Image (spheres, grey):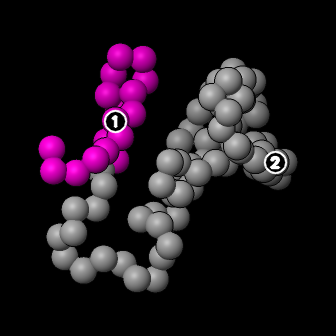
Amino acid sequence: FTSRGFWLYIGDTHVMHLAEYRGEGEPLTNVLTTIDHISFTCTDMPATEAHLKSLNVNYSIRDLPVLSVKQINFKDPVGNGVELFFYMANE
């Protein structure tokens, strides 16, 4: 490959590929990173937190009780935001 990337899996299934900017076209100048954030709807918040802690990932939690939602937020290795979205009714 001519650029670096990250492949995201659920179990053994590839669900998303994030690729590095390869210098094609004009880069965005109004942002500090390539994207502000990407969001995933998730389940099992306690297990997710335990996993992030085991990897020493710094994260924050946002509670949105009006929506019955909690979020875990952190940065990927190049500074893009990652939001993990948990419906508390499902937890």
Where does residue 20 sit, x and y in percent of width and height?
A: 30, 55
SS at mark 1?
Answer: strand
37 falls in the magenta region = no
Q: Are marks 2 and 1 in contact (CB under 8 Å)?
A: no
Q: Is residue 3 left or right of residue 70?
A: left
Q: Report if residue 10 lies within the magenta region.
A: yes
Comparing 1 with 80, the one in front is 1
Q: Position of residue 71 (x, y in %)?
A: 70, 45
Picture residue at 76% right of the left edge, 47% below the top: 60
**Which residue is depicted at the point 22% across and 62% down?**
22
Image: 49 above or below 64? above
- Quarter of the image holding residue 47? top right
Placement of 5 over or under 43, stated as above or below: below
Q: Residues within 10 Å of mark 2 (few under 14, many from 20)?
A: few
Of the residues shown, which amino acid type is indicated by label 2?
Asp
Give the class, few, some or many, for how many residues have Cα within 10 Å of label 1's Cα (few <14, many ≥20): few
| Bounds of the magenta segment | 1-18
Tell me which residue sits at (43%, 24%) in the image: 10
Q: Mark on residue 47?
A: none
The label shown at residue 7 is: 1
**Label 2 – label 1 distance at C-alpha:** 29 Å
Up-down relation of residue 42 to residue 37 (above or below): above
* Residue occupied by mark 2: 63
Element assignment for label 2: strand
The amino acid type of the residue labelled 1 equals: Trp
